[in-house]
């Protein structure tokens, strides 16, 4: 069987041309291969971590880190990386504010 693009001779059962790699399987020339779209979902851990970051910084940080890791490892199948990152930032900020508050209350408590 000869290739319809470059004219190179190929084996009768060949799927691709040995010279130009054209598809010889009977698909009309010029139609590109299309990937099947992957259904995506938003990470529940990322959502929970973002919400918890406003109420409990430590739990928000834990859930957000798990959600961020889940998004990064999924190769695009799981979304919510931005939510998880926001949850991490807000959780760290709330923990630092809480530590600063308790440090200032403790230092003023001894001076009354």
Image (tube, rainbow, N blue to C red):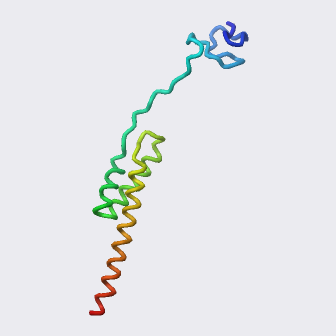
Q: In the displayed structure, would residue 84 be above or below residue 55?
A: above
- Quick one: 25 or 99, which is closer to the camera? 99
Q: Is residue 32 left or right of residue 88?
A: right
Give the farthest residue toward the bottom: 112
Task: Locate the N terminus by quadrant.
Answer: top right
Residue 61 image position (x, y, % from top left): 37, 60
Q: In the displayed structure, would residue 52 be above or below residue 105?
A: above
Which quadrant of the structure image shows residue 87? bottom left
Residue 85 image position (x, y, % from top left): 42, 55
Q: Residue at x 57, y 10 (%)?
A: 26
Counting every numbered tag in the picture gives 0
Q: Residue at x 36, y 75 (%)?
A: 99
- Quick one: 18 or 49, which is closer to the camera? 49
Q: Residue at x 42, y 52 (%)?
A: 68
Residue 106 image position (x, y, % from top left): 31, 84
Residue 67 image position (x, y, % from top left): 39, 51
Task: Locate the C terminus by quadrant.
Answer: bottom left
Q: Residue at x 30, y 91 (%)?
A: 110
Q: Is residue 37 left or right of residue 27?
A: left
């Amino acid at each position: 069987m000869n290739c319809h693009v470059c004219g190179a001779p190929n084996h009768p059962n060949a799927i691709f041309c040995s010279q130009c790699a054209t598809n010889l399987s009977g698909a009309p020339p010029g139609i590109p291969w299309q990937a099947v779209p992957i259904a995506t979902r938003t990470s529940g851990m990322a959502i929970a971590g973002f919400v918890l970051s406003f109420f409990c910084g430590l739990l928000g940080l834990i859930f957000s880190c798990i959600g961020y890791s889940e998004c990064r490892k999924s190769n695009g199948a799981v979304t919510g990386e931005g939510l998880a990152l926001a949850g991490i930032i807000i959780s760290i900020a709330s923990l630092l504010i809480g530590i600063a508050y308790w440090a200032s209350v403790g230092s003023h408590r001894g001076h009354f």
